[in-house]
Amino acid sequence: QVKVVESGGGLVRPGGSLRLSCAASGNIFSIFAMGWHRQAPGKQRELVARLSSSGIINYADSVKGRFAISRDNANNTVYLQMNSLNPEDTAVYYCNVVGRRLIGTCDSWGQGTQVTVSA
């Protein structure tokens, strides 16, 4: 099994910042990509940011220039630095890990961490 654990969510005022962390552990041999998705109430889950093992980064248009994804390869950890937060960023943020196990592949999700942006 691959375990994915997020942390760092919380309540922040508009214009504030938060840093999310996600650590992958367990039966994973190599990681192809790690990323963050979010789901707001009544909306579909959407990609926020994704970082591949080759260094390719994708951001949702709505977060470009405000969010930054980075990774600690040695610890299978990915971070999401979120700046200039606004109420539209309120959502549950989920970490996704795609990789290879010793046998087969994995496409694993964390349990999610709540981010609330409110005055």
Image (spheres, rainbow, N blue to C red):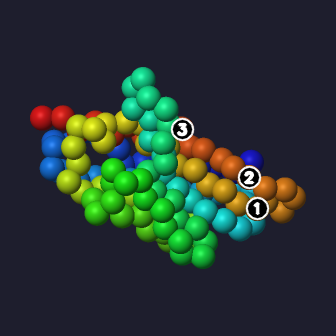
Q: Which badge, 3 or 2, is on the more N-terminal residue? A: 2
Q: Which of marks 3 and 2 is in front?
A: 2
Q: Tag 2: Cα neighbours inside 10 Å, few (<14), some, or many (≥20)?
A: many
Q: Nearer the viewer, mark 1 or mark 3?
A: 1
Tell me the kind of residue under disc 2.
Cys
Name the element at disc 1. Answer: strand
Residue under label 2: 106
Tell me the kind of residue under disc 3.
Gln
* Residue 90 pos. (x, y %): 31, 37
Give the residue at the far front of this rendering. 61
Q: Which badge, 1 or 3, is on the more N-terminal residue? A: 1
Name the element at disc 3. Answer: loop
Q: In which quarter of the image is the C terminus?
A: top left
Residue 111's tag is 3
Residue 44's tag is none
* Residue 14 pos. (x, y %): 16, 43
- Residue at 52 percent of width and 65 percent of height: 51
Q: Do the residues labelled 2 and 1 touch (CB within 8 Å)?
A: yes
